[in-house]
Image (cartoon, coloured by chain):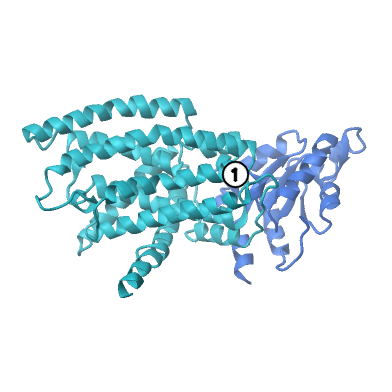
Amino acid sequence: MDWKMWSLKKSVWVFHVNTGACNNCDIEIVNLLTPKFDVERFGIKLVGSPRHADALLVTGVVTRQAAKRLQEVYRQTAKPCVVFCMGACACGTGIFEGAYHVAGPVDNIIRQVDPNAIIVYVPGCPPKPQAMIMGVVKALSALQPEKEYAT
Amino acid sequence: MIDALRNLSWILIFPGLVFTLAVGLLASWLVRKVSALVQYRVGPPVYQPMADVMKLMGKEVLIPQDAQRTVFMLAPLAGFSGVLLLSTMLWLVTARITYVGDIVVAIYLMVLPSLALILGSSASGSPHAAIGASREMKLVLGYELPLVLAFLVVIIKTADLVEPGQQLSLVAISQHTPVLSVSGLLAFVVALLCVQAKLGFVPFDIAESEAEVASGVMIEYSGALLAVWKLMQAMMLVALPLFLVVVFLGGIDLSGWSLLWGIGKYVLVLVLVILIKNTNPRVKIDQAMRFFWFYCGTPLAAAVILAMVGNYYGIAWL
């Protein structure tokens, strides 16, 4: 394993994008930073700008308003990066399937920009913090060196 | 030639770049670990700051379309080299190597990181960064005055103590401990708070507040450029507490067991800064200005008068 992959796996900075969630998943994400789970042990940290981020935590179904913004945020993120779909709404469209305001699940919206994007699905309503940590672990093992990412 | 090589090795290896970076990364781990312990968490492993910087070095560098490219890319390097020189100078002062005028140079070099931050964020063409830059500018205006005044107290207290033929320099100052007097203690407390603001730590992290302006001054930086900023901040964690130790706490003696005592003083200042960081909420920019000019300025004016009176009547503890 080269130094780029090693350091990327040891230090994942996360930017949290809410594309229309009910706040349930967001509360569980904040729960990850509390003393009980403390993901800073693994070098995972919330950052304030997508340019600093290695992972986008997307919560909620993508509304038509949010779709363009999500794509823009993905383009602004420094590559290589991973996209996490947190919760049932982000993975599929959950209970909002077929509703008038829905632009689609997160993976469709991201793949319109970058077909090669690494997308991780963490289902649940809301997913448990343990499930989220497991999602992060699986995503990190899926990361490959020397892969081309669109920007 | 030999002299030039020696100076270069001072700046690039010991006690400059390599040594300061190692200590700085260790210090920034200490910041995160102590913060975690205060919050009953476990905290990151010791290699965490190094992994962060390595990761940023390997990532893509994005430059915004509206950015002024040259300034945007050179600003981190300017700030970095400023802190590098400052820290090299301070370590050389602890080794009793000095020159005339190093006090003024130290004050100049300490402003350089903030100036670079303002330049870089103004060049990035982002409204959030512009807000961050304006706040950083006001913060610099706020804390520079008390910091120089606190320095003045030390100069007044030590000016009479240097021997006739000797120049007043940081080395001469570092042989006294002004903090053991009333005016010196006042000046030390204020200087500690100014260093807090210089490091950009809570309660004075107004310029890069993550909640309101999304990392403010650094919002548009990514990849290797952000890594340089992070390294600069890590090195400031070495240089600024060391400056306090040199000026107020009697410096670091490099011989034998007193070296341990010197390192203890540095760690003490660092932990004080971290504890202030973890027990205070962020203030607004107007509150910060008022704090520095009135609540720090007034006691400092009193400290200056006390120091002069003490000098005049020869009372050492004033």
State which chain is coloured blue: A
Secondary structure found at label 1: helix
Place of residue B1 in the rendered image (x, y in percent of width and height, measured from the top left): 33, 75
Name the residue at 36% across, 48% down: B240
Place of residue B78 in the rendered image (x, y in percent of width and height, measured from the top left): 48, 53
Above or below, A1 against A84 in this view is below
Nearest to the observer: residue B116 or residue B303: B116
Residue A43 visible here: no
Residue B225 visible here: yes
Q: Colour of chain B?
A: cyan
Above or below, B91 against B144 in this view is below
User: In which image quadrant can residue A149 be found?
Assistant: bottom right
Indicate left or right for B91 with B62 as reference. left
Name the residue at 37% across, 38% down: B194
Nearest to the observer: residue B189 or residue B63: B63
Indicate left or right for A17 with B102 as reference. right
User: In which image quadrant can residue B155 be found?
Assistant: top left
List the residue tagged with mark 1: B123
Name the residue at 62% across, 37% down: B128
User: In which image quadrant can residue B223 be found?
Assistant: bottom right
Indicate left or right for A39 with A70 as reference. left
How many residues crowd around disc 1 within 10 Å: few (fewer than 14), some, or many (20 or more)?
many
Place of residue B235 in the rendered image (x, y in percent of width and height, measured from the top left): 42, 54
Place of residue B192 in the rendered image (x, y in percent of width and height, measured from the top left): 33, 40
**Chain of the residue where label 1 is placed in the rendered structure:** B
Above or below, B110 against B90 in this view is above
Name the residue at 22% across, 40% down: B154
Given the image, on which type of amino acid does mark 1 rest? Ala
